[in-house]
Amino acid sequence: MSLSLADIQREQPRQVPLANWQDVLQAELNAFDTASSTVSGIGDVAKTINFAIDQCVQTLKMTVATTCGLCQITC
């Protein structure tokens, strides 16, 4: 479902009863914590992928060096 500009302009801001402001604030803080954890998790995944790529490159370098040694070609 997509909203047009007219639909958005018709929307009224949500009114939060004063008694519930603490619940709303807590929900916002929880959402922020979740977003922060997600960003941190993405960073950890990126580090893991980077480590795996480095390991593959090192293995490839060792394989090339071994192959070159067998055929007595200097790499």
Image (tube, rainbow, N blue to C red):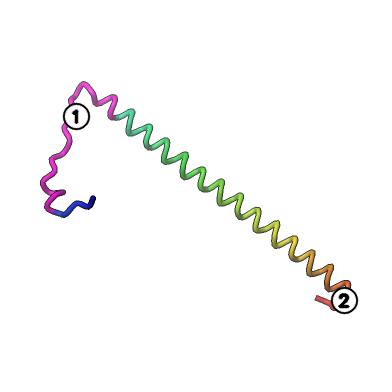
Q: Which residues are magenta?
A: 6-24
Given the image, on which type of amino acid does mark 1 rest?
Val
Farthest residue to the bottom: give it.
73
Residue wearing tag 1: 16
Residue 55 position within the rendered picture, expressed as x and y whole percent measured from the top left: 70, 56
Given the image, on which type of amino acid does mark 2 rest?
Cys
Quadrant location of the C terminus in the rendered image: bottom right
Residue visible at 38% across and 32% down?
30
Label 2 environment density (alpha carbons within 10 Å; few <14, some 14–19, many ≥20): few
- Where residue 32 sits, quadrant-wise, is top left
Residue 25 position within the rendered picture, expressed as x and y whole percent measured from the top left: 30, 29
Cα separation, mark 1 vs mark 2, equals: 77 Å
**In this image, 75 relative to 34: left or right?**
right
Label 1 environment density (alpha carbons within 10 Å; few <14, some 14–19, many ≥20): few
28 or 11, nearer to the observer = 11
Residue 50 position within the rendered picture, expressed as x and y whole percent measured from the top left: 61, 55
Mark 1 or 2 closer to N-term?
1
Residue visible at 19% across and 29% down?
16
Residue 52 higher or lower than 40, as above or below: below
Q: Nearer the viewer, mark 1 or mark 2?
A: 2
Residue 19 position within the rendered picture, expressed as x and y whole percent measured from the top left: 21, 21
Residue visible at 65% across and 54% down?
52
Q: Specify the label residue 71 is tagged with.
A: 2
Let me know if residue 31 is in the magenta part: no
Q: Specify the label residue 42 is tagged with.
A: none
- Where residue 35 sits, quadrant-wise, is top left
Let me know if residue 8 is in the magenta part: yes
Main SS of the magenta part reads helix
- Where residue 14 sits, quadrant-wise, is top left
Marks 1 and 2 close (CB-CB < 8 Å): no
